[in-house]
Amino acid sequence: MKTKIIFVTGGVLSSLGKGLSSASIAAMMEGRGLSVRNLKMDPYINVDPGTMSPYQHGEVYVTDDGAETDLDLGHYERFSSQTTARENNFTTGKVYESVIRKERRGEYLGRTVQVIPHITNEIKNRILRLATDSTDLLIVEVGGTVGDIESLPFLEAIRQLRFDWGRENVLYAHVTLVPYIKTADELKTKPTQHSVKELRSIGVQPDFLICRSDRLLPADIKSKIALFCNLPAERVFSAPDVDTIYRLPLLFGDEGLGDAICQELNIWTRKPDMRMWEDVVQRFLNPKATTRIGIVGKYVHLVESYKSLNEALAHGGLPHQARVELEFVSSDELEKGDLTPIAKMDGILVPGGFGERGSEGKIAAVRYARENGVPYLGICLGMQMAVVEFARHVLDLEGANSREFDQSTEHAVIDLMEEQKEITMKGGTMRLGSYPCRIEDGTLAHSIYGTNEIAERHRHRYEVNNDYRERLDAAGLRATGTSPDGLLCEIVELKDHPWFFGCQFHPEYKSKPNQPHPIFTSFVRAALEHSKRRGEGTSSEASGVSSLAGTLLTDPPGGVSVES
Ligand code: GLN
């Protein structure tokens, strides 16, 4: 059977959840036994989002094969069993890059190179590359909003593909907004009408509409939309606000989207088996405990920039039937000296990051966690800051720092390593993608993973400086996971602390709601235990609050009492 393709476009405005809709379709169809793949096409000119600021673009999602991609690929992996790769995301920049290369090599035989057919052909080829024999259904999300100048070549390419690939093998789904206007007490269909009109003017008649709204659409609204948009009312679906995003595949199924897709594409599948998603939703909605994690970072006011992390922490609570409340703490704020925001936390997490701003605040957060027995998880930069903090305050190496933040430091405990340079010389400047790691027996890392061999995804330049490894180890901050040759430090953990773990890689990329990543499961368990201990000991209200300038008194985990 030829791979069936669903194109997902978006109208009216961005952030409507096209990515989640595409991922939910994948989940729903995988539940029917189909093998699914997702692709995201981004109309911007950047060759990939690797260089874009998190303010602009949100999280950069890293694949096993080391591609820096759009965060929607994270949704695709979390909602299905597929592992995405470089080919699951491309941009206008990438398309032009390859067309221009071909032109320079003379592959166009002297012809004038044009948007149609050369750019559109390149787009079509890249789509069809994923339509392999082993793929039943390919879901292709077109980034941006219909009406954008940048989107046009993509929309033209998908218009043509219906002819090339066969009418019966291609569907168009369009995600739009149906806003509720309070003053009129009405759901408004006009934005949807306009957006579909725009799409039809370039030759694409949607087969389905997925309407984002704050509620389920009533039948009369669906009929009205159907009439104006030239499709049957049974092809208008609601995508209401949901209590948890993992409900969407169930909701789409209930609305009949799965049946409709099978009907339109003329395929037979088994009855949907969505028990896994029902279980995930049940666990999300019936927590028996709550724990509070403080995330100390630079982009704290932008939730999109820690998408996978937020999800992974929520997943980590599921096996414990616990709700994980996330409190974002700006490292800039901590830097000013007031640690109140983290003193109330059951666990502290410093995520990945680049650039100096806020690093002293992160170091202060690590110190607080280390000295007060608060569970600490440091990811990438968060691990590096844990090493710096330990070097400064336990090894007494004054001014210890990462080379990234202090070029002339006498103690660059985090530095560019020769071993790392060898890797990065092959391509960019960063260690990107999946690398193996060997874990030592009898360690926290081993108890978390239950195995000695793991592989996790990386995105960084700097490494723990091997010149300091012995001293760190002797004083209690041990490298319990390393590259198989032992030369790159991948995991550090602290002796005599309830739970203190740093990893050079990003475990959050591989966490799924039905398979929470074990690091997060373990971290949340430690946080739950910490809050229990705290409840039994000094209450959080009674405990004092430290200041950067003051002395932090180390207390056993039983009672957190800190005095300045
Ligand atoms: N900036 C650090 C490095 O390049 C950490 C990167 C990260 O946290 N992803 O090594």
Image (cartoon, rainbow, N blue to C red):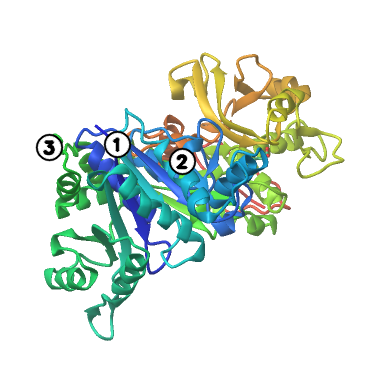
Instruction: Write down the quadrant of residue 318 in the picture.
Output: top left
Ligand 1 position by quadrant: top right
User: What label does residue 3 carry, if any?
Assistant: 1
- Which residue is disc 2 drawn over? 126
Where residue 295 sits in the image (x, y, percent)?
53, 49
Query: Could you say whether the residue bearing mark 1 is in a helix, strand or loop?
Result: loop
Please tell me which residue is depicted at 24% across the width and 43% down the height of the picture: 28
Give whichever of discs 2 and 1 has the lower sequence position. 1
Q: What's the amino acid at mark 2?
A: Arg
- Which residue is disc 3 drawn over? 271
* C-alpha gap between disc 1 and disc 3: 20 Å
Q: What's the amino acid at mark 3?
A: Lys
* C-alpha gap between disc 3 and disc 2: 32 Å
Q: Is residue 171 visible?
A: yes
Q: Quadrant of the N terminus?
A: top left
Instruction: Write down the quadrant of residue 174 in the picture.
Output: bottom left
Q: What's the amino acid at mark 1?
A: Thr
Please tell me which residue is depicted at 67% across the width and 35% down the height of the picture: 430
Query: Could you say whether the residue bearing mark 2 is in a helix, strand or loop?
Result: helix
Numbered disc in front, either 1 or 3:
1
Q: Is residue 554 visible?
A: no
Where residue 198 sits in the image (x, y, percent)?
36, 69
Crowdedness near tag 1: few (<14), some (14–19) or many (≥20) residues, C-alpha within 10 Å: many
Where residue 73 sits in the image (x, y, percent)?
44, 43
